Image: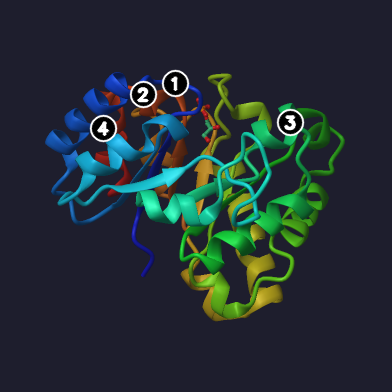
Amino acid sequence: MRRPFIAGNWKMHKTVSQAVALVDELIELVGGDQGVEVVVAPPFTALYPVAQRLKGSNLKLSAQDCFWEEEGAYTGEISPPMLADVGCAYCIVGHSERRHVFGEGSDEVARKARALLAHGVSPIVCVGETLDEREEGRTIKVVGSQLQGSLEGLSQKDMVKVVIAYEPVWAIGTGRTATPYQAQDMHAFIRGWLGDSFGGGVASSTPILYGGSVKPDNIRGLMAMDDIDGALVGGASLKASSFAQIIEGGKG
Ligand code: 13P
């Protein structure tokens, strides 16, 4: 049985004081919840203060990106051991904004995923097609090749710690969610791909999250689908009340 998994990606939002205020409200609303894996991904500057607040709650901490080296002359970068040290259980990699705004490729995503796993941090690996790719009928091909490239070099044992997020680029921040059926089709494809590549055990245990304009009023329809295990939420995770409603809806 896969446990529902709801993660909030705060992107480039929240100062330290705003982040602490948001997480305090969330702990109040959902901090004792046992039924859902709840994760927050603040910006780097807020990771440490948020980690302090999360102690003793059921909420887990995630970073939004990392570099793959452990340390060195890499100005501006943050390494997996630094994230582990600050208390991150997870780190998002290959988010579409990293791929499209910063030109990251799947080979880099895989290097990051491997480096995180070596330090006990679970990667949340994002994949998803653009609107043009969908309209040209290339969705399966694009997502299949992103999976192949982004999970390159990972073993069956590594996969036990990996979370996949399917985020169609055309649904991110646009208010245009994939329908539950469109999302389910892709989640079923991803689960099948995991089965072919890593075996049935990995396919049935890997959480596959949907991301793209998830809101309190559409979470239940998405969660009702067999292969949708949770959500990676952007905009609606920036307010405690709407994120808490999504967590409630995530219980199905
Ligand atoms: P929105 O929920 O704002 O569409 O963002 C989705 C996303 O990119 C989460 O990582």
Element on which disc 2 rests:
loop
Tell whether 12 sits left or right of 248: right
Name the side, left or right, on which 127 lies relative to 178. Answer: right
Among numbered discs 1 and 4, the one appearing first in the sequence: 1
Judge from the rendering whether residue 242 lies leftward or rightward of residue 166; answer left or right.
left
Which disc number belongs to residue 238? 2
Identify the amino acid type marked 2.
Leu
Q: Where is residue 212 in the image (x, y as percent from the top left)?
A: 54, 32
Name the disc covering residue 218, or none: none
Q: Mark 1 and mark 4: span between their CA atoms?
A: 20 Å
| Residue denoted by label 3 | 102
Residue holding disc 1: 13
Do residues under tags 3 and 2 come within 8 Å of each other at their CB atoms? no
Quadrant where the image shows the N terminus: bottom left
- Circle 4 sits on which residue? 245
| Residue in front for this viewpoint, 247 or 69 | 69
Q: How far apart are marks 1 and 2 (CA)?
A: 8 Å
Examine the rendered structure and indicate whether residue 145 appears above or below residue 192: above
The disc labelled 3 sits on which kind of residue?
Answer: Phe
